[in-house]
Image (cartoon, helix red, strand yellow):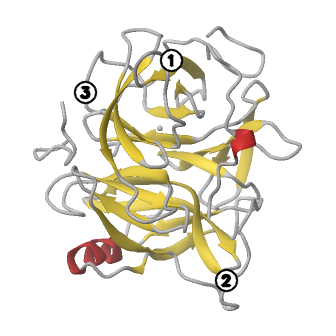
């Protein structure tokens, strides 16, 4: 179960997450020593598309209130600008998703927004699409698009809630409970701890997520060994069709990353780039997870006093961290 505590919601760095059918949703700073840098040397989307100005980038990450892009080849992170839902204000953004065309969608705990990027740097305009919280106390954190054909003919948004379960999100805000990630031998739950990403490999849809082990009788809190898990896309598709939640864990990738609060992930080639929010004594970090499931820190970001909140990459990214199946 993932929690954003109010004391961690403040973001101090004011200047600075298709194919034929398309998406089911279709409504109309300065560089610092902490690792932020302005750079144009970033890789292009495979399709070169996206709504608004074309931006040569592949992975996006964000804090509660600011959007960044990252070049997966060099790990250069560029500050794009603050989220703006109107009048210079914005809800706390908990994650983002990028479809095959490069369109960016973000969510708060209770709503979905479409993001429009500036031509260079500057405010990222948000247009509210729909509310999504269907249960009392339900809050959503993780967000990702599934490729077309997984949950219906088009790409579809999937969100993870504060109970660690995944839900399909329709364009009108209706949700379908897809299931969770099972338990260990002692009855503890493997709950989604941070984020999701989906992609195509050899013509098959695949998914990855970060989970952590939680005692169902105790608030999960923060652990520091999030595990990379392959999402069982076949089980997810069956759950959507039958409206019966299933066990969505296909396999673990290794035995633990050694890092926690990995609230944003973006997969690229044989690596997962995980954005760690922050620890009690550690600044926010960029961690790279390899095929063995272990994490290696790449950069730290002491200026992000509330840390990273989410990340996303187009469903058209080439991902090879898992062997073909």
Q: Name the residue under label 1.
A: 80
Secondary element at tag 2: loop
Residue sitting nearer the eye, 25 or 224? 25
Residue 301 in percent (x, y) is at 74, 29
Q: What residue would you read off at disc 2?
A: 188
Residue 318 visible to an observer of this rendering: no
Picture quadrant where residue 276 is located? top right
Judge from the rendering whether residue 321 lies leftward or rightward of residue 14; answer left or right: left
Label 3, label 1: how many angstroms apart (C-alpha)? 18 Å
Q: Distance between the residues labelled 1 and 2?
A: 40 Å
Question: Callout 1: helix, strand or loop?
Answer: strand
Decide if residue 8 is in sight here: yes
Mark closer to the chain start, 3 or 1:
3
Image mark for residue 49:
3
Position of the C terminus, as image quadrant, is bottom left
Which is nearer the eye, 131 or 58? 131
In this view, 11 is above or below 252: above
Horizontal and vertical percent position of residue 228: 59, 62
- Mark 1: few, some, or many residues within 10 Å (few <14, many ≥20)? many
């Amino acid at each position: 179960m993932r929690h954003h505590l109010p004391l961690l919601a403040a973001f101090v760095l004011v200047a600075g997450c298709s194919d034929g059918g398309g998406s089911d949703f279709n409504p109309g700073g300065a560089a610092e020593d902490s690792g932020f840098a302005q750079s144009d040397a970033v890789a292009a989307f495979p399709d070169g598309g996206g709504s608004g100005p074309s931006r040569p980038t592949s992975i996006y990450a964000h804090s509660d209130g600011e959007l960044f892009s990252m070049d997966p080849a060099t790990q250069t992170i560029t500050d794009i600008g603050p989220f703006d839902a109107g009048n210079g204000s914005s809800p706390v953004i908990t994650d983002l998703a990028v479809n095959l065309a490069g369109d960016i969608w973000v969510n708060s705990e209770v709503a979905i927004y479409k993001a429009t990027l500036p031509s260079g740097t500057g405010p990222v305009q948000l247009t509210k699409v729909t509310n999504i919280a269907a249960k009392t106390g339900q809050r959503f954190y993780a967000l990702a698009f599934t490729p077309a054909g997984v949950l219906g003919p088009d790409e579809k948004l999937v969100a993870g809630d504060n109970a660690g379960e995944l839900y399909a999100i329709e364009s009108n805000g209706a949700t379908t409970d897809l299931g969770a990630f099972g338990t260990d031998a002692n009855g503890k739950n493997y709950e989604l701890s941070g984020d999701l990403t989906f992609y195509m490999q050899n013509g098959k849809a695949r998914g990855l997520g970060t989970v952590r082990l939680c005692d169902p009788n105790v608030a999960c809190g923060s652990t520091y060994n999030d595990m990379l898990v392959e999402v069982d896309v076949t089980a997810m598709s069956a759950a959507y069709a039958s409206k019966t939640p299933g066990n969505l864990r296909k396999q673990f990738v290794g035995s633990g990353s050694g890092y926690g609060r990995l609230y944003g992930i973006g997969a690229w080639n044989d690596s997962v780039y995980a954005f760690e929010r922050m620890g009690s004594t550690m600044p926010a970090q960029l961690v790279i997870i390899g095929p063995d499931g272990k994490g290696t820190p790449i950069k730290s970001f002491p200026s992000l006093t509330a840390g990273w909140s989410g990340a996303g990459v187009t469903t058209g990214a080439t991902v090879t961290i898992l062997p073909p199946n």
